[in-house]
Each structure stands twice: as C-alpha cells, then as structure tokens.
Image (cartoon, rainbow, N blue to C red):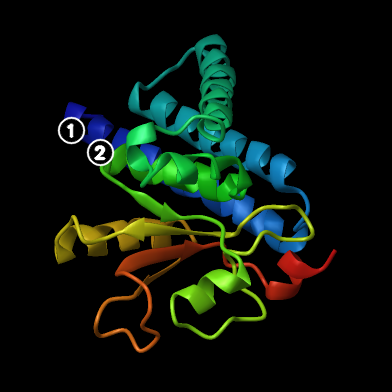
Amino acid sequence: MSVVASLILLLAGTLTSLILLVRVQLLLLAHYPTAEWPAMAAGLLAGGVTLAIAVAMALRLRSPRRALMLLLALPTMLLTAGCLSVTHFPRSNFKSDELRAEWYRLHPTLRNALWVARLGEGALILTDVTRKPSNYGEMGLTEPSWSSHFTSPRNGYAHAIDLRVRDAGDLRNWARQGVFLALGLKADRHGGPTDRHGGTADHLHVSLPLRQDAITTQ
C-alpha cells in the first residue's frame, strides 16, 4: 500500500470513527431513551474500535500483539477524551458566562457532537441551551406546549442547542450544518428577516432526532 493510499485510509477511518461515535449513540437512544451514559460510552468505544482498525490497516501491522495493543489503546483514549468533552468545553465558544453555566443541562450526546464539530470549526458560538415557555412570549412568539430546548422531565436535559451564524458566511454555515447532519442530528437554520417564525436572531438550531414522547414521558 502506497503512502498516499495509507493517508487516505487513515483520513477516511478517522472521519468514519467520529461519525459513528455519535450515530451509535443515537441508535441506542432511539431504543433506550434513558440510557444516556451507556449510549455515550458505547458510541465512543465504537468510534475508537473503528479508528484502531483504520490505523492498523494504514500502518500495515502484521503483529497480532501490536494490533491488540492498538485495539485497546485507541478506544480507551477516545473514551477518555469523549468523557472529558462532556465536562469541559472552551469558554470562548459560549455567548456568555450564564450560558456556559447551562452546559451540564445539555444532553451528553449533543455535548459529544459539539466536541466533534469543534474539531473542524473552532469558532462555533453557542447562543441558547435551555428555554422556558415564557421565553417565547418575551420574543413575541406563541408559547409552545413543548420544545426541545425545554429540560426533559425524564432526564433533566435540554435536547437542542442554538449556534450563532451571523459571524460566518453562507459557505461556512452550510458546512457546519452539513457536519451535524452527517452526525445524524437535526440541523435547521432559524430566525432572521426571512424566517416565517420571526422573533429570534438568525441561528442554527441543532437537536437530537428523538420522538417527543421519548423526551417528555417520565
């Protein structure tokens, strides 16, 4: 295998592992909505195993011992990094310190997804995590009976995040949206003068693709 082919394989394996990291979590959450932390661990390990296989193939490892060490090391490293990502996110990526305090109220899978997205776009700015029905009235909108920004009575987490788009051009915003869609999340652009909803600033709304009853039922 040529060096170029090895690099392509390594790049493809890395991208695949990051996508699987989130998609495996979503697959498990669709069947077990309350298994947030086991789903996160399973997704991180699945991504780590995929990355280990890609690295082993790219390096053409022939030693079973080295391959086994790699198969143990990379999933463990990715699991550790993923766990750190749900507790630590750069202060510069939050609109305010008040919003930063809400980080732990965001669903762990969304926190992992934001960590993955930030690897390719470090300038992401989070603008909203949790909301109350009264917040919509303050924006001149009809108060909804349910929103993915509401904290769930089932697990206490918000299942959506809003990202600022005004500081980036259309191309970058489309790329950001594409990343979240590739990870299996819902990603829609809301707000601005052409949005029929009105009342909110232009933003990218990213949410978990879970049924409403899976979020709201206790």
Decide: marks 2, 1 in contact (CB < 8 A)?
yes
Residue drawn at x 17%, y 56% as measured from the top left: 168
- Left or right of 32: which side holds 53? left
Q: Secondary structure at mark 2?
A: helix
The image quadrant where one finds the N terminus is: top left
Residue 138: percent from left, percent from top: 48, 74
Secondary structure at badge 1 equals: helix
Q: Quadrant of residue 166?
A: bottom left
Indicate the amino acid at tag 2. Ile
The residue lying toward the viewer, choosing from 18 and 107, is 107
Residue placed at 50% from the left, 37% from the top? Answer: 50
Q: Nearer the viewer, residue 76 or 131?
A: 131
Whether residue 1 is visible here, answered yes or no, is yes
Q: How far apart in space, not on screen, are marks 2 and 1 (Cα)?
A: 6 Å
Pinpoint residue 56: horizontal percent, then vertical percent.
43, 24
Residue in the picture at 78% in, 53% down:
34
Question: Can residue 18 be seen in this snapshot?
Answer: no
Between 80 and 60, the one lying in front of the other is 80
Q: Is residue 18 above or below residue 83?
A: below
Name the residue beneath numbered marker 1: 4
Q: Which residue is mark 2?
A: 8
Q: What's under tag 1, amino acid-wise?
A: Val
Is 149 left or right of 7, judged from the image as shown?
right
